[in-house]
């Protein structure tokens, strides 16, 4: 069995900064409420001519450069998103075309906030078995076009933002470094606690005027308190599960990168892990919750800030809609 290593990370966020004070103009909310409840100060929204796969391409190009690779080195694409360019086909195919690598397999996955960690696990398995040598894993989201930016949708609208992150995962000859373990979980009993009901194939037609004008079902629904309660227990559990599986002590961790869901969730997780602030990465202040993009964006920024170096032991952990939760333990 081979070992899989992340050899390059990159991210892109749109230049359009939306501050809490900008949202105050669209809905009944306040900078104070948003800061206190979520820790978010601002987020990025795409401009009219910018799309999910465009951001993914920009993040990918940076990741490729840092890995010293070219698009034609990529054997396979795993693309995590809940906000693809089109209903179908998947955004992985669009990115593959933009990268000009026809024929290369492209797989879209939809596990929402855990999408990137699930994607990393898929890449890890394909590399371990020898099927592929170099895999591109992307997380990219355009949340701003799917949320209700009025008072009715304010609980969700203030939390989410747009952006993309990418990682190049390669076969490694070094048995001591790379992805040590991944843990993947889901519990479908909670599907409706954080979901976007329409448009979907359960209804005929799958998109109607009623859905848009009366039901609000085209917008996400979140049972915030319920999500919070589950998140603060699942994050530490899945991190400890990874440590135990890999036979590594918590004290050896250099950095934990949690999915940037909410500052209060990250703080509660940090306390449960009993870790110092500098070892738990946070950039939600700048970007809000970018769902599948949040971990690769955070990973790329941590790399740029010198918080991830050769041999760093890094744990990624995520929780979100599904419910799904997952972790990856990586010796960089
Ligand atoms: N601005 C101002 N007021 C708002 C608001 C906003 N953006 N959103 C909700 N409110 C109001 C509510 O209407 C409610 O008013 P009421 O008391 O008059 O009914 C009040 O604030 C409290 O709402 P509540 O939902 O009880 O707040 P909360 O303390 O649970 O905080 C969240 C809400 C969403 C911040 C919190 O539940 C949370 O962080 N949940 C986890 C969300 C998350 O991380 N999701 C992503 C997971 S991947």
Image (cartoon, rainbow, N blue to C red):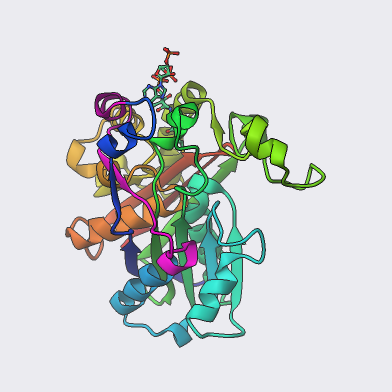
Q: Position of residue 124 (x, y in %)?
A: 51, 64
Asked if the magenta segment contains residue 286, the reply would be no
The residue at the point 49 percent across, 79 percent down is: 98
Residue 51 versus residue 318 in the image, above or below: below
Which of the 4 image quarters holds residue 8?
A: bottom left
90 over 247 or under it: above or below? below
Quick check: is 52 in the magenta stretch?
yes
Write the residue at 66% across / 36% down.
188
Q: Which residues are magenta?
A: 30-55
What residue lies at 57% left-to-right and 42% top-to-bottom? Answer: 185
Q: Quadrant of ligand 1?
A: top left
On the question of residue 24 being in view, the answer is yes
Q: x, y percentage for residue 120?
A: 48, 60
Residue 253 makes an appearance in the image: no
Residue 197 lies, in percent from the top left, at 66, 38
Image location (x, y in percent) of residue 97:
54, 80
Q: Is residue 88 or residue 152 the one in the foreground?
A: 152
Which is more toward the observer, 49 or 162?
Answer: 49
- Could you tell me how many numbered marks the image carries? 0
Residue at image location 47% in from the left, 21% down from the top: 225
Which quadrant is home to the C terminus? Answer: bottom left
Q: Nearer the viewer, residue 237 or 294?
A: 294
């Amino acid at each position: 069995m081979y070992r899989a290593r992340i050899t390059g990370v990159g991210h892109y966020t749109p230049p359009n900064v939306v501050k809490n004070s900008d949202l105050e103009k669209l809905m009944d909310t306040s900078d104070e409420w948003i800061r206190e409840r979520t820790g978010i100060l601002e987020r990025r929204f795409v401009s009219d001519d910018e799309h999910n796969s465009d951001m993914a391409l920009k993040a990918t190009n940076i990741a490729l450069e840092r890995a010293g690779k070219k698009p034609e080195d990529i054997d396979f694409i795993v693309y995590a998103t809940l906000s693809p360019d089109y209903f179908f086909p998947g955004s992985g195919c669009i990115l593959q075309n933009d990268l000009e690598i026809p024929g290369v397999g492209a797989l879209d996955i939809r596990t929402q906030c855990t999408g990137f960690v699930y994607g990393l696990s898929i890449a890890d398995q394909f590399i371990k078995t020898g099927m592929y040598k170099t895999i591109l894993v992307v997380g990219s989201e355009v949340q701003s076009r799917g949320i209700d930016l009025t008072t009715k949708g304010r609980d969700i609208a203030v939390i989410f933002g747009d952006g993309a992150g990418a990682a190049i995962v390669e076969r490694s000859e070094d048995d001591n470094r790379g992805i040590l373990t991944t843990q993947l979980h889901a519990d479908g009993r909670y599907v409706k606690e954080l979901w976007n009901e329409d448009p979907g194939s359960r209804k005929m037609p799958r998109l109607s005027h009623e859905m848009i004008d009366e039901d609000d079902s085209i917008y996400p629904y979140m049972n915030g308190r319920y999500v919070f309660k589950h998140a603060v227990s699942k994050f530490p559990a899945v991190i400890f599960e990874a440590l135990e599986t890999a036979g590594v002590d918590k004290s050896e961790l250099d950095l934990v990168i949690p999915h940037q869901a909410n500052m209060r969730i990250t703080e509660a997780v940090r306390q449960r892990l009993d870790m110092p602030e500098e070892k738990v990465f946070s950039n939600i202040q700048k970007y809000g919750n970018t769902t599948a993009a949040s971990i690769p964006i955070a990973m790329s920024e941590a790399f740029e800030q010198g918080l991830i170096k050769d041999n760093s032991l890094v744990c990624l952990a995520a929780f979100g809609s599904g419910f799904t939760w997952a972790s990856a333990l990586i010796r960089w």
